[in-house]
Image (spheres, coloured by chain):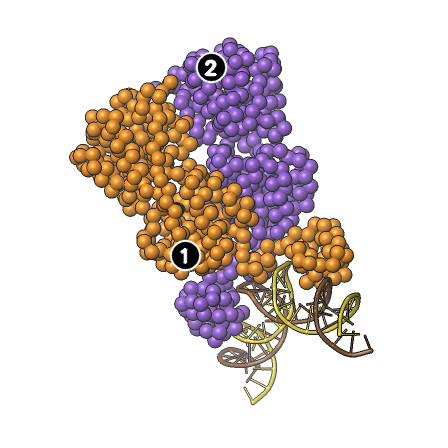
Chain colours: A orange, B purple, C brown, D yellow
Amino acid sequence: MSDEPTITTIARRAGVSIASVSRVLNGLPTRAETERRVMSVARELGYVPNSAARSLKSRRSNQIGFAMADIGNPVYLAMVREIQPVLKAAGYRLVLHSTNADVADEIDVLRGLGERYIDGLIMIPLRVTDGHLEMFAAARAPIVVIGSVPEGTPVDNVRVDSRAGVRLAVQHLHGLGRRRIGFVNGPLDTVPGAARSAAYAEALETLGLPYDRDLVEVGDFYRADGARAAARLLERVPDLDALLCANDLIALGALDVLRRAGRRVPEDVAVAGMDDTDLATIAWPPLTSVSLGSAERGRAAAELLLDHLDRDGRAPRTVTVEPRLVTRASTMGEETP
Amino acid sequence: MSDEPTITTIARRAGVSIASVSRVLNGLPTRAETERRVMSVARELGYVPNSAARSLKSRRSNQIGFAMADIGNPVYLAMVREIQPVLKAAGYRLVLHSTNADVADEIDVLRGLGERYIDGLIMIPLRVTDGHLEMFAAARAPIVVIGSVPEGTPVDNVRVDSRAGVRLAVQHLHGLGRRRIGFVNGPLDTVPGAARSAAYAEALETLGLPYDRDLVEVGDFYRADGARAAARLLERVPDLDALLCANDLIALGALDVLRRAGRRVPEDVAVAGMDDTDLATIAWPPLTSVSLGSAERGRAAAELLLDHLDRDGRAPRTVTVEPRLVTRASTMGEETP
DNA sequence: CACGTCTCTGAAAACGTTTACGGATGGAGG
DNA sequence: CCTCCATCCGTAAACGTTTTCAGAGACGTG
């Protein structure tokens, strides 16, 4: 009585079988009188179906996992904001996993797919190891990877041509007359770090600029790391006139350092970030940034996943998002009020 | 065979009963030989326990829900960042609910407690209705509410003396010689909106300043609303010399407006926000803000919940966090580099 | 009146675990 | 050699659903 009511309780009180209760609650055709009785008892008892029992039987949890390195990074945040409503509208709950870019942690999440507590997973691995690939291949539930993944990996994939993104930024800086374009990157053993590193070299070459390894610094993808890396770079190459940062957080760190060093942005040093997060419009000066369509990627990932859940065993699909340069005062001084 | 392996599969292959398999997998005492056989088969098959079955039997889901208005707001984000690792360390997963401050949505989440897909819930309701209170009273699982809740509500509670917070800010502005202190608040029918409104009036009175309703504007808790509200205020009261904003997002909007209007911050208008989010250090000028200890509140909420899960039926507890004023350049010009 | 058809319902099995209970085995102690 | 106890294990029930199957009645038709 004081225990949580189950369909058995209801059945007894309504004088019907549990099968009938289940049918009524699931909207299957039932005699009006039976339906009335069941519904009235159910309401009276405040009945709520037990999700574990339901999941066990139906083999669906109505939950979707989202695994990223750190929810504090605004890029991931922008994605969550898009993913959440899409899933919610489709009747799924969102289970969050913050992995600190730890490979073992990510593998754990993938193993979790076997527990069937989620029906599908959206994941943003910073590094894709053999372990990842094995789990992808063995996975029994749909996975969407945001970020690049080797050709032929059996998962849905949402990617962005970050190479093109870097090119846009370098061309823009070059077009402003900058010739000593520094680059503050994230770790080279990460997928985006590696891609951006290659793209930077390539973009310089396309423009006929020499590749000077002194102009490149590597830190982590956070503001404090960006600040430290920018400081090192600035000390080593005092005649720097532009700085491309591998994400907005790094760029914020760089802005701090430049300000403290008394360099004017953009007059002395033009600064561009990547990801075009909300922070870009909050920073001072407002930050030119390469939009990698995070919101778009989040939405696409959610939609891919739902589609895959609808059509079981569908072939993997890839969605590619186009980068776009959003110029602001940190490179185009004239925009400054 | 190609189906997901269960303990039955393992039992058959290892020539033991499912009970033995379960015992081995749960680390209960077993003969070494049995243990060896079971483990080897389990590993070979890549066995992963089914969480629905486990939950059904054990009546625990190992999931915790977190419900807030909008994950995009950095205050909630700061909390998630603290909550997630605490829960993870204790073996719980985090289920995220974004309710858009919609009352029906929040009630739905509370009803969800009955589904038992979460073992407990951390919630930040912007408005606390009778519906909330009913569900709190009826809830079968521990709930922690971050924010104020009427005396005697049977839930754990983490609160902050926002009244004291507002007072700190107003006193600070007054101490800087400001006498026309505007206030941009959020909706008055929300718990924080109402509290801050009362606190503002009270603080003025304490300081012997007159309460001028022209100095108060109400918008929503977002940047754009903050900008609009600040613009209205500025037009109505051109001789404004300070602006207190009910959260950092509003303050960012206000900074935008002031800049566009050519008012210098802090020389012409000193600006203070509340929440002391990361944005405060990114804004220009860096924003003085009242820290309401979001990280601390998040951690406290997670710990309260875990404690309650450990000790079933424990009496509700309340944790109160002290606000703290963090001064930056938006009020203290001299700090500007 | 017998039959078929249709609608509604109940009994029971199944989903994959955990766990109470008791049976079997083996060794120690008398 | 018997008894007793400890140790390990298997049987079976239980958790709360969904769903299959077949039975019961009602009703129309030949």
Within 10 Å of disc 1 (Cα), the crowding (few <14, some 14-19, many 20+) is few
What is the number of the mark on residue B296?
A: none
Q: Tell me the number on the disc at residue B269.
A: 2
Residue A167: x %, y % from top left? 27, 36
Q: Position of residue A317 (x, y in %)?
A: 39, 52
Residue B52 visible: no
Q: Is residue B44 visible?
A: yes
Q: Is residue D26 above or below residue B135?
A: below
Q: Is mark 1 on a helix, strand or loop?
A: loop
Secondary structure at numbered mark 2: loop
Q: Which image quarter holds the C terminus of chain A?
A: top left
B172 lies above or below B111: above
Please give the name of the residue rendered at 55% of the width and 27% of the height, measured from the top-left corner: B220
User: In the image, what residue type sits under mark 2?
Assistant: Val
Label 2: chain? Answer: B
**Viewer-side label of 1, 2:** 1
User: Along the line of sight, which residue is nearer the eye, A84 or A5?
Assistant: A84
Q: Distance between the residues labelled 1 and 2?
A: 60 Å
Q: B101 and A288: which one is in front?
A: A288
Looking at the rendered structure, which numbered label has been put on residue A315? 1
Determine which quarter of the picture holds residue A108: bottom left
Type of amino acid under label 1: Ala
Number of marks: 2
